[in-house]
Amino acid sequence: MEYRLDSHTHTLASGHAYNTILEMASAAAQKGLGLLAITEHSVAMPGTCGSFYFHNLKIIPRELCGITVLFGAELNIMDHTGNTDMDDDMAAHMDVTVASLHIPCIDPGTVDENTRAILGAIENPLVNIIGHPDDGRYPVDFDTIAAAAKEHRTLLELNNHSLEPGCTRENARENDIRMLEMCMKYRTPVILNSDAHWCGDIGNHSMSMPLIEELGFPEELVVNRSIEEYKKFINRYKSCSLQ
């Protein structure tokens, strides 16, 4: 399968990533991608950019280095009801949003608490993607999450970085297998993302693609196969696609 896009990446603005916007766009173009989404960590993450940064993203062209470049945010889920650290008005102006559980922003809870936190984000119409739900530090009920993601048309992420040796997320492979099995059960679409924090990792699916192949995961449930399919789920385009 040829994957056409990467929808979870970070630049210097996130505080712990290492390239500029133009460096990231250039790398994506050189790797043959048609679309790159840059999703900086939202305001509650230590060291990231402030709200004015997100408000001002409107000034940047959405075509750079010959490809489509979208700008959004990786929202931090802040409590066990799924509230995030970005207000609805600002989130509505993001091209794309990822919502994730991060240790600096929320302590791990019980399976029920963590599941409710992700469900709250899934049910938020301004959240497009659930980031790295495979982090075993936040155990969840994947059956419940996959069913809800299908109902609310929210993408579940297969995060390549989670599967890399040395990643601090725990039990990612086992959790990803369980998540993908439940996605096959409910026919829930997924998105493969690099979570790149430097330009060399853009479009890197070296750990996630073999897992997809191992499980025989259906190609039609992987939105990376088509930019047009991806657009159906993303804030910048999905309202138009429903008209």
Image (cartoon, grey):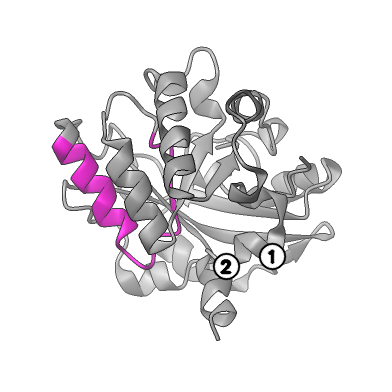
Which residue in the rendered view is the most extreme toward the top? Answer: 165
- The reply to whether discs 1 and 2 touch (Cβ–Cβ < 8 Å) is yes
* Side of 200 relative to 187 (left or right): right
Q: Which residues are magenta?
A: 112-133
Residue at horizontal 52 percent and vertical 36 percent from the top = 158
Secondary structure of the residue carrying tag 1 is: helix
Queried whether the magenta region covers residue 115, the answer comes back as yes
Report which residue position mark 2 lands on. Answer: 232
Q: Amino acid at mark 2?
A: Lys
The local secondary structure at tag 2 comes to loop
Question: Disc 1 designates what residue?
Answer: 228
* Distance between the alpha carbons at the discs numbered 1 and 2: 7 Å
Percent position (x, y) of residue 163? 52, 22
Foreground residue, 190 or 68?
190
Q: Residue furthest bottom?
A: 243
Q: Is residue 232 left or right of residue 84?
A: right
Q: Amino acid at mark 1?
A: Glu
Crowding at mark 1 (Cα within 10 Å: few <14, some 14-19, many 20+): few
Q: Quadrant of residue 111?
A: top left
Residue 243, position in %: x, y? 55, 86
Q: Position of residue 114 (x, y in %)?
A: 21, 38
